[in-house]
Image: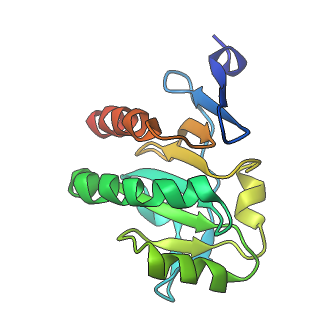
Amino acid sequence: MDKLAKIFISAIIGLGVIATTVNAADQSTDKAPDFTLKSNSGDNMRLAEQRGNVVMLNFWASWCGPCKQEMPLLDELHKRYSRAGFTIIGVNVERDPEDAKRVLRDIPVSFPVLFDTESSVSKAYDVSAMPTTVMIDRDGKIRHLHKGFKPGYENEYRKQIKQLIRE
């Protein structure tokens, strides 16, 4: 079955956003594009350094209500599964990181947040909706893609995290 046959689209009622989930678990050969960005701790972080871990990339913006709504839920997932070889990397997509830093003061998270001020990583991952969440397996392959967020999506994230950790 090709990738297009695995795309599921559902309208997110009340948010006016289209949510898309791509499940490429069986046949994915799409390597996650590598990148290096500055983090909220001031250090540079490179995706390739996470090889061997299950990684959730979460692209977000300070002006995005659903992004801020899911951040505490993502933080709970990070805290729960990080000892099992899972990490979340938040990627803020705004040119000026100051707005993101203000959000992080109000909604602190334990996972690293990187600043994509030039939009190079957003372009590499074809980010077209906020938030966009990309699940990457231990071999660095993109396995799941979620565009948009509504309450309850964290349950699907949890299932996917558990599945990828067990592999």
The residue at the point 35 percent across, 32 percent down is 159
Q: In this view, does 73 lie above or below 137?
A: below
Say left or right for 64 vs 120: left
The residue at the point 65 percent across, 24 percent down is 10
User: In this view, which residue lies farthest toward the bottom?
Assistant: 42
Asked which colour scheme the image uses, the reply is rainbow
Q: Which quarter of the rendering shows the N terminus?
A: top right
Location of residue 103 by image quarter: bottom right
Q: In this view, does 144 lie above or below 79?
A: above
Say left or right for 25 vs 131: left
The spot of residue 42 in percent (x, y) is: 51, 89
The spot of residue 78 in percent (x, y) is: 33, 57
The residue at the point 65 percent across, 54 percent down is 33
123 or 21: which is nearer to us? 21
The spot of residue 90 in percent (x, y) is: 52, 64
Say left or right for 21 vs 2: left
The spot of residue 115 in percent (x, y) is: 63, 75
Say left or right for 75 vs 140: left
